Amino acid sequence: MLTEINIGRNLVRNENMEGLDHFKKALEIARTIPHPSGIITAANALAWYGRSHNLDEAIHYAKDALYWMGWYFENPRLYAFDTALEVLNSANDKSIYEITKDFIFLYESSSEEEKQRYKKRYTQTKHMLSITFYKSDGKMRRFMRTLNKQNILEDSGISKMEVFNILHSKVKSIRGDTIRRILKRIDIKDFQIDSLPSPFWIEFVKMKDGLEDGIDAVINGRQTLDPYVKARLDLEREFLGRMPERAKENFIKAYLNLDKDERRVMDRFARDYIRYDIKWGMRIKAPDEMGEYAKLFHLKKRPAALAYWSYDDEDGREKLVRTLGRVRDGLGGG
């Protein structure tokens, strides 16, 4: 696999596009093993080096790299985001705005070394989301007319004159502030993302608080165009799906009673549980409580133990056990 990647890099750096075939071979090998880092590295290389050769294919691989980064790793490196933003910047792909916002969030919580490496990209992304005015086109006006029939525009505090001017093409642009006021009066879950005019999606993304990628986001039907976030939501969705219906309902009730930090601990536990539900050639010892919680939530002991050991520090492991105890108590089991 690494040999194929190295051969591919040497070829493409000498402008020989046959190198892309070696990246594809490496990706195929990595998926067969499976080898998480190999999958992401090969997909990322296909996106980066192939972007001037076949843009549609490059976009596919860039999103693939982001997805598997979210699926396999709790703490991502920024290179897959950097590649995705470079590739998507050349395409009219609506996902770039959410990926941009999430890159900013992850960058700001990264190490100084990572920040230095991607400082230029960070500046570019901050500028991208600094939009304050949007063109009023046909799709925008049709969408606004739909909202107007539901009295949403009036409820948003927009003057009748402004509504008239927007609906009858009297203005060429709409302020981001106006769109935000409307967004605060609607439930975004009532709309398919693709049905939203781009300005509404961009302003919605700008209003996001963090990644919004926890179990509560799954419960609330969170929509996303960021493959990294989608992978994390898919892990949590699969975690909930492993439980019998009654156990899942009780778990969700207990989860929703946790505070913000405790929810984050449970979100990570859910993701790691699915990540580590793999064949393992050795016995894994964990505190007796982990076996108790696995039984309580109808989970397997081994991936629950591996999720426990995924923490490098004792404090993290102790916090996980305490939080699971809080969920147990919320179920009335303690």
Image: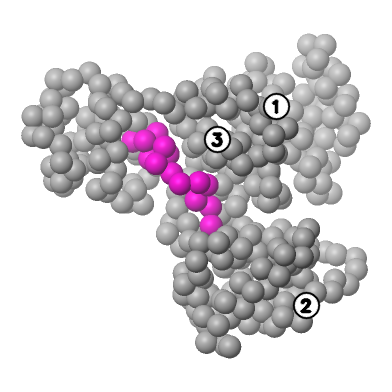
Q: Earlier in the sequence, mark 1 or mark 2?
A: 1
Report which quarter residue 167 is drawn in.
top left
Indicate how the structure is coloured in the image: one colour
Which residues, given as a range, are shown in magenta? Answer: 200-214
Which disc is residue 117 wearing? 1
Residue drawn at 70 percent across, 83 percent down? 292
Residue drawn at 47 percent across, 69 percent down? 256
For the residues bearing labels 1 and 2, Cβ distance under 8 angstroms: no
**Quadrant that contains the N terminus:** top right
Relative to 67, does residue 333 appear above or below in the rendering?
below
Residue drawn at 50 percent across, 46 percent down? 210
Residue 284 lies, in percent from the top left, at: 85, 71
Residue drawn at 88 percent across, 34 percent down? 2
| Callout 1 secondary element | helix
Report which quarter residue 22 is drawn in.
top right
Residue 253 lies, in percent from the top left, at: 46, 75
Residue 262 lies, in percent from the top left, at: 56, 66
Magenta run includes residue 210? yes
Q: Amino acid at mark 1?
A: Arg
Which disc is residue 104 wearing? 3
Q: Amino acid at mark 3?
A: Ile
Which disc is residue 287 wearing? 2
Which disc is residue 169 wearing? none
Q: Residue furthest left?
A: 160
Q: Earlier in the sequence, mark 1 or mark 3?
A: 3
Q: Is residue 290 left or right of residue 179?
A: right
